[in-house]
Image: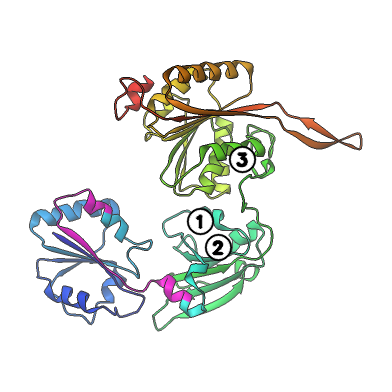
Amino acid sequence: MEIHVVGLGVKAQAVLCQDVQRLLASLSAHDKILGSARQLETLGEIAYQAQSHTLPKLADLADCIEHWQQQGVEKLVVLASGDALHYGIGAWLGRFVDQNPALDTIRYYANVSSVQEACHRLGLSLQDAQVVSLHGRPLFSLRRYLQPNRNLLLLTDQFSQPQHIAKELLQAGLDDSQIQVCEALGYDEEKVTAYSAKELAELAHEFNPLNVVVVITSHQDSLYPSTPGIAESRFVTDKGHGKGMITKREVRLAILSYMALDAKDVVWDIGAGCGGVSVELAYWQEKATVYGIEHHPERLACLEENRQRFGVMQNLHIIAGRAPQALVDLPLPNKVFIGGSDGTLEDMMNQVWRLLPVGGRLVVSAVTETSRCQVMSFMTSRDLAQDAEDDALQIAISKCERLAGQRVFRPSLPVNLYQFIKNKALNNEPEHNSIKETLS
């Protein structure tokens, strides 16, 4: 079966290239066209023989495609609003075809997206803006993008309508930001209206659900950081803002450097506490997947609140439980940070080390003499096995405070950080380690 993914543009009546017109004309009565009711309506003036179906939920789509393939359907046309490969269904279909060799081919047909159309209405260069999809995503995920002096193009749904977005800007401290709502682009009822964030937040108006929201953030200071090293006071902790189980900013910066996150990295933060490290890792590399493992109930609640506060719900996953038992169902990591181990640090390091691939990183923090001795023992094992490049540093921080009306520097306990980069597989180590076998 061939799959054809057709972008419809943003017009009330689809404007299709000759290749798509020929494709539709070639369809038999046994072939299928999938789309939403609105998308199917845009083909109203185009003749074709294929059977039209409302696009099912993605959870059911795979079964439908397999069923039609067994029935002998030769061509399946899937309609997409605008550009199918820009926050559209095209990427999902591409992955599905890659995983199903029995499918013959997939072909994409480009068209203008609502984002492009909005840029042209407003004279905004697309390369100077960032596109953020809130469609089917939590509104809180917008927060990671709310920094000063940014151009944001937002794809919305019923939970991220213009007033919701304006209230998020106010909460961020960016109340002077400008918002332009582009409604029903390409339709007779098209409308483009400009507001300030303050004005829109208080507006009692129902917008057309088919909209793109363009935000020009103000130059005001934002609650959400533009550079690494989030102040402790910004985090919710189990002992008041910035005073509980939270890694100090200066230490966190060194951890971020050691972890060196890239896109597609899978990270375990073992003993995540209230989430200082997990949140920053997820915040600065949105294409990495971070798992924060914590068992303490109060810290777990803070971790979840910080996850929402900084808008990292998409790529920070909270795992409630103790390591190693809580790790067995997780994807294999290629980078691990151990910030807490409940006295089993050396065992935990050895178990994690066996799971890491060549090139994987293990970063460990140690404050007590007991934990330092356990890390040094592990380091000695690595020297004997000659399977790691290692690095270590001690961070001693003194912060300026007032004492009896005078400024003094009050020292904190030194923190030791250790980094291990795996440079070869262990003896008799299988090519693909099983988490359950390794951690048992």
Mark toward the viewer: 1 or 3: 3
Q: What is the distance, in whole Å, between disc 1 and disc 3 at their CAs?
A: 28 Å
Q: Which residues are magenta?
A: 95-119
- Outermost residue, right direction? 405
Dot 1 or dot 2, earlier in sequence: 1
110 falls in the magenta region: yes
Dot 3 or dot 2, earlier in sequence: 2
- Locate residue 300 relative to residue 183 in the image: left or right: right
Number of numbered discs visible in the structure rendering = 3
- Say whether marks 1 and 3 touch (CB < 8 Å): no
- Which mark identifies residue 268? none
Dot 1 or dot 3, earlier in sequence: 1
Q: Amino acid at mark 2?
A: Ile
Residue for badge 1: 139
* In front of the other: 171 or 353: 353
**Residue at horizontal 57 percent and vertical 32 percent from the top:** 273
Q: Amino acid at mark 3?
A: Leu
